[in-house]
Structure formats: C-alpha cells, structure tokens
Amino acid sequence: MSSGEPRVARPEGAAGRGPRQLDRRAWLGLSAAGLLGWGVSAWLRQQGAPPQRLGDTPVFRQVVDDPGSPRIGPTNANVTVVIFTDYQCPVCRRTDAALGRLIAQDLQVAVIYKDWPILGETSRAAAQVALAAARQGRYAEVHVALMASRGALTAERIRDAALSAGVDWSRLEADRSRDAAQIEAQLGRHALQAFALGLEGTPAYLVGRQLVRGGLDDAALRRLVKIARADRSRHG
C-alpha cells in the first residue's frame, strides 16, 4: 500500500472549503476506513469468523484427500478437522493447544495439517523442518514444539524445537535435503488449496464442511465438531 497521500478529486465551486481542507478530510476518512478494516480483519483472525458451509466440490476434495498433508487420528474418524497454519502466526500459536486438547479428548476426530508459511523465510524453514520430520513419524511432535516455542523463531530455535520433539536431527537434515523438491511441492499445494478456498491468512479451519477463518478456542471447536457430526448424519 502506498504511503503517499491519495489524490482526491476537488469539485469546483465548493463554497467555504479550500482544496487542502477537502484533501485532509478525504485522507482522514480513507485512513479511518483502512484502520477499521485492518481491525476487523485482526479481530476475525483471533476470534473466528462465522462458519461457511462447503459443498462436496473438487476444491473440497483436493483439500481433504491430499495424501501428502500430515494427518493424525483414526482413519475411520467421523469428523476431520483441517487446519491451515503458520508457525510464526501469533493467533495460530495461541489457539493450537485447543486443537491438541480436542484430539486428546475426542478419539473420533482426525486432524489434517496444512503448513502454509506466509510470514517469511523463517516460517518456510519451520514448515520444511516439520514436513521433513514426518519422514521419521514425528510431524505432530515437531508441530507442537514449534507452536510452543517462545519468542521469534530462528534457525537455532527451530532446531531446538525439533530436538525436543525427539527427532534425529542428522537424519532430518538429510531427508530435508533429499526430499526438498517434494516438500516444496507439498507447500505449494497447500498454498493453492488455501487460495482456492478464498483464505487470506492463518489460522483457518475446515471442521467437517464448516470453513472458519480465524482462531478457535475449546468451546468453538467442540461446537463445530457437534455441527459436523449432525451434518454427517443428515447428509452422509
């Protein structure tokens, strides 16, 4: 977004209102609108926007049937939660534990993780490490460790998180290097899926057929799981 003052058309003959006064009022109005839009967007990311029910479209199937996306939980789960996330997203970090508690308490819920690193190269490096850890069967552990990491992520903190999750770091580096093209392709698919769903940021959840943009706490997750189960019983 340009930082310069926008050009505003000046109607001729505007009595009692000089050009500078008109420009200033227009600029203040635009600035206020922009701040309001940013504030609403941030609030929605933190609180969760109203859910949007998706049909059984090709986009929906691409999201839930992507075999490369890490998945935890039973294969016969009656509710699947898909989450788009970035390890440097503050709202993702604050709300990730609620999803962990859900799958610990409800054994009929499965989770599909969509690493979508949109906040810079450090986010991308963290996502690459998490996907490389999946080669050792340690994706979930690394995901939790990265989300729980304190402070801004660095290469050292990413490594420490992976080690605390029990990975073999030498093997992880080898897997990350050998499978770099596959990992990048997977991240690319996640990004395309996010764009196809119309997402603008992280986190975002797909609980059954209910798409929610923004963070979800324990109560909201349980409520959406209940809706997903009812939806499944009605529509199959």
Image (tube, rainbow, N blue to C red):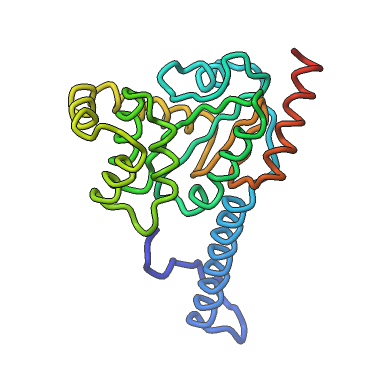
Q: Which residue is drawn at 67% across and 30% down?
A: 106
Q: Which of 103 and 214 is in front in this view?
A: 103
Point out the image quarter for the C terminus. top right
Q: What x and y, as percent, mark residue 134?
A: 36, 26
Instruction: List the single residue furthest toward the bottom.
Output: 16
Q: Please state if 220 lies on the left or on the right of 17 as rendered.
A: right
Q: Which residue is drawn at 63% across and 45% down?
A: 216
Vertical placement of residue 58 versus 115, above or below: above
User: How many numbered marks does the figure carry?
Assistant: 0
Q: What x and y, as percent, mark residue 42?
A: 56, 56
Q: Which of 221 and 2 is in front in this view?
A: 221
Q: Residue at x 47, y 40 (%)?
A: 85
Q: Please state if 189 lies on the left or on the right of 206 as rendered.
A: left
Point out the image quarter for the N terminus. bottom left
Vertical placement of residue 228 versus 198, above or below: above
Q: What x and y, as percent, mark residue 235?
A: 77, 15
Q: Nearer the viewer, residue 171 or 12?
A: 171
Q: What x and y, as percent, mark residue 87?
A: 40, 45
Q: Which residue is drawn at 58% across and 36% down?
A: 205
Q: Please state if 233 lies on the left or on the right of 124 as rendered.
A: right
Q: In which quarter of the image is residue 184?
A: top left
